[in-house]
Image (spheres, coloured by chain):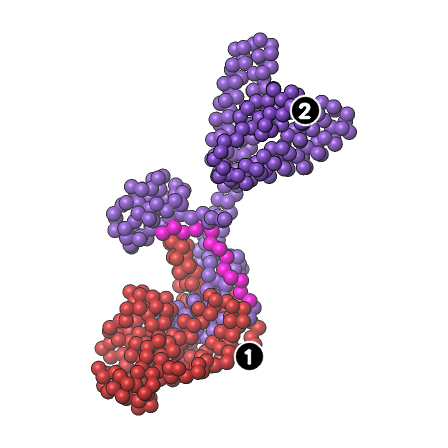
Amino acid sequence: MSVTKKYAVRNIRLCTKDCLCLYVCPTGAADTENSIIDVEKCIGCGDCADACPSGAISLVPFEYPPQQPKTESVVSTLNTLLRSKAKQENIAAGLPGKLAKAIEKSNRIMAEDIIREAGYMLPQSHNTRQFLQSLLEQNPEGFPRETVEKLLTVLYDQKEDKQMKENKILDNLMEAFAGESQANRKYLAYAKQAEKEGKLNAAKLFRAAADAETLHAFKLLEVAGKIGSTADNLKDGITGETYEYKEMYPAFVKEAEAAGNKAAVMAYTFAMKAEEVHAKLYQEALENIDQTEEVFYYLCPVCGNIEKFVPDKCSICGIPGKKFIKY
Amino acid sequence: MAKYVCSICGFVYDETEGIPEAGMAAGTKWDELPDDWVCPLCGAEKADFMKQGAPSTDHAEKPKTVHDASLDMQQLSPLEVSALCSNLARACEQQYKAEEADLFKELAGYFKSVSAPAKDPNFSQLLDLVEKDLEQDFPNAKAAASEVKDRGALRALTWSEKVTRILKSLLHRYQKEGDALLENTGVYVCTICGFIYIGDELPEVCPVCKVATWKFEKVEGR
Ligand SMILES: [Zn+2]
Ligand SMILES: [Zn+2]
């Protein structure tokens, strides 16, 4: 399912100033001095368009789908007609009277329509961009060069710029999310250490700070738009866990073995086996997503294995089943 | 008694009924209509009507000549570049991009202003070009577009071919009637497809592109 991002625009000629749009708009984007809806604030929800009694608001996409590609023979036959219509416009322009004036206009309209279908429907298209650039190559007297340059800037640079900024923002969000998530786990590990040493105040502070980082991480992930429906999230879980147990950990295990680091080998192996179990459980949960009968999960507190019943002992690390934690 | 259908707008002339309010009594045969009779709705000529139920006489659409020119910017005349710019201005307006639309209009104006005027223009040159379009270039373009199922191009070609037939009809009438054709009557152009309407009572929608006729523009004399 792909959804094109859209934003609302108001046709001022149709607007009857009933202002229901102001009332329903959740972000205040419709509330501007000049009646032009604020693109920066608009989230494309369409509430304003639905509420408007005069049909003055429509949603337009940020990106238009590309025009159907044009074959050589279509372009060349259309070009022949374009040439003829332009000639007729020119002849009619030199003749007196209302009919000649109407014929001049009529031919211009046909020429526009024909050229549009010869691959120039969208101002954002590659064709249009090339056309504008080709205009800059010639420079006869009085040619409004700045107009062409301005068009090139507003049509293409701004868009690329905006896209780049948006990409950068997403990168930053995900980087911050990774940092906050790591800090959370690190502080929890530090809290455990502090408890072991009997430094209970420090342990408390670490736990509080760890919770704070969790709040930050949740917010960042939400803003980045990375939290989907539960079905989507289960699929994402499957992808992540599968990658870890099939590719990431096997490679790590090999490297640790080669270096003779037994502790690392064990940590990787436990995690790898547990991730495989997680991936399977996510898959099951996805298949039974609408099941209402309650399911219990049991977590091995040593290796991270998860079972749906209490085992005699953990199938991965071997600790007794009575140590498992019920969820 | 037979019926004849206008291939431009779909108007049906029924011999049984005639058009009494226009002086054609019920029972007036198609062949009895004067040669310069035109469709009361869109102004198409008699030749643009087809007998209802007769096998379609749509010309077998095969390209006659092959042109190999592609849309090479260096080859476009200033007026063609102007049309390209005003087309893009329209496209910007449809996307509510007012600033860009104005910039393209400015370019269109510039290129129209530097276009060399036609030498010794006259109406029969127009008629020659219209006839060449209809006989050769529309069939070629339609064949090329149908071959690759280019629906956009076919749509544009259908509209502009119909409008060109109307131009042919108007040019014929103007040859015969001269300025009397335009006396005391409005002249309108459909701003969407280019259809020209002569008269004062506008139909509700354009006979060619079916847009509501508030999109028509009245042409004032010059
Ligand atoms: Zn008609
Ligand atoms: Zn029209």
Chain of the residue under label 2: A
Across and down, in percent, residue A12 comes to 30, 52
Q: Nearer the viewer, residue A82 or A278?
A: A278
The amino acid at mark 1 is Thr
**The magenta segment:** A58-71
Determine whether, in the image, residue A172 is placed left or right of residue A23: right
Chain of the residue under label 1: B
Question: Of circles 2 and 1, which is in front?
Answer: 2
Task: Give the SS element for disc 2.
Answer: loop
The chain drawn in purple is A
CA gap, disc 2 and disc 1: 81 Å
Q: Residue at x 29, y 54 (%)?
A: A14
> For residue B65, which numbered disc appears in the image?
1
Residue A46, placed above or below residue A211: below
Q: Which residue is mark 2?
A: A317
Q: Nearer the viewer, residue A86 or B40?
A: B40
Residue A84, placed above or below residue A143: below
Badge 2 and badge 1 both on one subunit: no
Instruction: Judge: label 1 CB < 8 Å from ligand 2.
Output: no
Residue A70 part of the magenta segment: yes
Picture quadrant where residue B6 is located = bottom left
Q: Residue furthest top?
A: A198
Across and down, in percent, residue B170 comes to 34, 80
Task: Evaluate whether residue A265 shows in this view.
Answer: yes
Picture quadrant where residue A175 is located = top right
The amino acid at mark 2 is Cys
Across and down, in percent, residue A300 comes to 61, 24
The chain drawn in red is B
Q: Are marks 2 and 1 in contact (CB under 8 Å)?
A: no
